[in-house]
Image: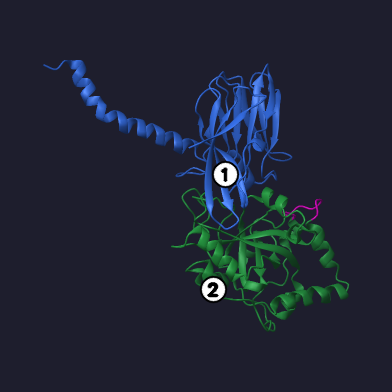
Chain colours: A green, B blue
Amino acid sequence: MQRNLCVLAVATSIFAGCSEDDRDTGYFGPGLSPTDQSRDQQIANLPGQIGRAASSVGTSDLTVLGENANANQAAFRQRFGLTDPTQDQMADWQQYDARFTEYSDKDHDWPLPTAASANWQGSVWSNGDPLALEGTTVAVDFNRIPRGSLIYIPSLNMYAEANDTGATGLWSQQDYNQSDYGANGTGRIDIYNSSGDRSALQTERDFSNWIGGNHYGSICVVYRGPGWKQGGR
Amino acid sequence: METGRSLTLRTMKPLLRPFLLVLIIAETVVGQNPPLAGDPYASRGNPRSPDGKYVWAIKNSPSIEYILEQNSSGRVLVQVPAYYPRPDPGNLKYAKASGVFWNSTGTIVALDELNRRRAGQLYFFQIRDGQARQIKIGALVPIPPSVAEFRLVVDPGWQSETKIRLRQSVKQKDGAFTDNFFLADFSDPVRPKIEKTK
């Protein structure tokens, strides 16, 4: 339902002749930088403002991402005044194609979190890297989404901070002809899982079952770059 | 009656095994990519060639690149783009975490970027007569079926003047992880060989 709302919002803005869509799509072209300050400073009707709540949201239950995922999402929302987006907000936010994949603390090549920017909780390892938090951390291709951006995943009703990254060269090669790396794509959204007692295999299986085997969907880039955190407590 | 020498041997013998073990562990920790402990951004290996003639440096503008220079003249032999080439502090920090591994004679060098969940590249170059030539070995290494992501890393380093041990880090499509180990043999740098190892 929420995804339909997103599509409806995009369709509405297209019929309204909204040029914002074109510019946002162009942003992902080769000529524009994701660290473009005008983009970073642009705020697209941040959530938490008064409005009519969208009638339906995604799964809302993030437990599969780890024991504390729901609590982390709730704390994240509370700290930065994020609420379920209204229909108006959903209509304002640009929708992008994405592919949802997962990673976890069971990754052999991630013994230490080698993330890229300060975490919303401010908690870091001794080396200065942020701790990944299940329920709010995603790894993205910084060539597609600026480091530290706030994103919203309608199908999961999940806000997340794009503060980690991965093998983006491989991602773009492998998904070259797919929607996530198309003209309106944000690339892969690699969602962090805290595996707990689960194996890496089980974590992947749980994630796939959770998203219904459909790795392709849409996301909203609510705010480009880390500036949205300045309003947080 | 025990001589001083036999006494020394008897004292040393029990210590020899733990000593060798510590050496092996130390080498693994130094060469492991990413590091098993400590700061993942600590540089590995040595950017300077054994004879001191060449040195690797990182260029930050207009994009992040690794360059191999002749120490005396500053002449650039090699320019390699960093995996994350956009010049920002996070990407520069990542680039600086690369490892440089020269063989003992300084004729072959490996440039191994930090392994961040299979991100990064491993490059080999032959240095001869003041010139550098890239040696590509990727096509020689078998790729297991059902691979989602993989890359080669140095692990832990040179085993001899011509052989270096590598780890192929694999994430399968089903989410499982596997490691495969290889020896890359540069006895003939024009026709390098790859053999499986433990």
Query: Horizontal and vertical percent for residue A215?
Result: 66, 65
- The residue nearer to you, when weighing B169 against B79, is B169
**In this picture, residue B20 sits left or right of residue A136:** left
Q: Quadrant of residue B13?
A: top left
The one nearer the camera, B19 or B92, is B19
Q: Main secondary structure of the magenta part?
A: loop
Q: Residues within 10 Å of mark 1 (few under 14, many from 20)?
A: many
Question: Helix, strand or loop at disc 2?
Answer: helix
**In this image, B114 relative to B11: left or right?**
right
User: Is there any visible trace of residue A115 in the rendered image?
Assistant: yes
Q: In which quadrant of the rendered image does the C terminus of chain A lie? A: bottom right
Residue at which label 2 appears? A74
Q: Amino acid at mark 2?
A: Ala
Residue wearing tag 1: B115
Magenta highlight range: A29-36
Q: What secondary structure is marked by label 1?
A: loop
Depicted A30 relative to depicted A54: above or below: above
Q: Check if residue B133 falls in the magenta segment.
A: no
* Front residue of this view, candidates B90 and B153: B153
- Specify the quadrant that holds the N terminus of chain A: bottom right
Above or below — where is A78 with respect to A124?
below
Image coordinates of residue A10 in percent, x first then y, are 80, 73
> At label 1, which amino acid type do we have?
Asn
Left or right, B185 with respect to A68, comes to right
Instruction: Give the residue displayed 51% in from the left and 50% down from the top.
Output: A108
